[in-house]
């Protein structure tokens, strides 16, 4: 007798379309587009310019993969990888970057394990401030990471980019 999953697959193919409650795929998922990433990037650049800070700004999808990047004139090239690590961390950890645990001092074991975790993740994990997740309809769809100013300035620039996208979507 076929396994229950095999029966479901047969039912799916027999009907010519997947069953609405099929456990095989996720449906109706919100995703960040390139146009959305450009909206975030543009607003973040404007905020950085208003603050007088020259930044590197990275926008990633929900898995931390680069969608858009800008290095403002005069920004330090070395802050580019930092901006990407901040964005990837915010997207994959599903929270703003900063001290872990959030809002508190990192504990000793976590602090000692962080370099190993960052290395295991290809150097794409950081607790530096300046990474902010982009949440739409309750789902993390991406993140923005900024490097070039102080941690607080970087976070402010990143939040401005996220706010612009949410405003363009009607505050969702």
Image: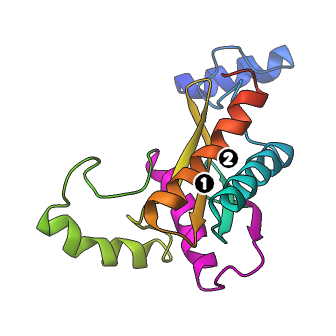
Residue 156 location, x and y as percent?
Answer: 54, 51
150 left or right of 28 in image: left
What residue is shown at x 54% (from left), y 22% (from top)? Answer: 4
What residue is shown at x 74% (from left), y 58% (from top)? Answer: 45
Residue 27 location, x and y as percent?
Answer: 70, 26
Question: Residue 74 in magenta?
Answer: yes
Specify the quadrant that holds the N terminus.
Answer: top right
Residue 106 location, x and y as percent?
Answer: 20, 60
Numbered badge on residue 157: 1
What segment carries the magenta color?
67-94
Mark 1, secondary structure of its residue:
helix
Front-most of residues 8 and 150: 150
The residue wearing badge 2 is 161
Answer yes or no: is residue 2 visible: no
Exactly how many numbered labels are in the figure?
2
62 left or right of 12 in image: left
Mark 1 is surrounded, within 10 Å at the Cα level, by few (under 14), some (14 to 19) or many (20 or more) other residues, namely many
Image marks 1 and 2: residues in contact by CB distance under 8 Å:
yes
Mark 2 is surrounded, within 10 Å at the Cα level, by few (under 14), some (14 to 19) or many (20 or more) other residues, namely many
Front-most of residues 48 and 20: 48
96 left or right of 138 in image: left
């Amino acid at each position: 007798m076929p396994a229950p999953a095999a029966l479901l697959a047969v039912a799916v193919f027999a009907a010519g379309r997947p069953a609405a409650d099929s456990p095989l795929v996720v449906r109706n998922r919100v995703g960040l587009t390139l146009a959305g990433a450009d909206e975030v990037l543009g607003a973040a650049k404007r905020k950085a310019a208003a603050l007088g800070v020259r930044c590197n700004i990275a926008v990633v999808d929900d898995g931390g993969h680069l969608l858009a990047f800008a290095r403002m004139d005069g920004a330090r090239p070395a802050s580019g990888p930092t901006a990407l690590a901040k964005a990837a961390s915010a997207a994959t950890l599903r929270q703003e970057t900063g001290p872990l645990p959030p809002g508190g001092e990192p504990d000793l074991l976590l602090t000692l394990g962080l370099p190993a975790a960052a290395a295991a993740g290809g150097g794409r994990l950081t607790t530096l401030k300046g990474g902010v997740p982009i949440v739409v309809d309750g789902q993390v769809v991406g993140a923005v990471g900024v490097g070039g100013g102080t941690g607080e300035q970087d976070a402010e620039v990143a939040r401005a980019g996220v706010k612009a996208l949410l405003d363009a979507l009607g505050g969702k």
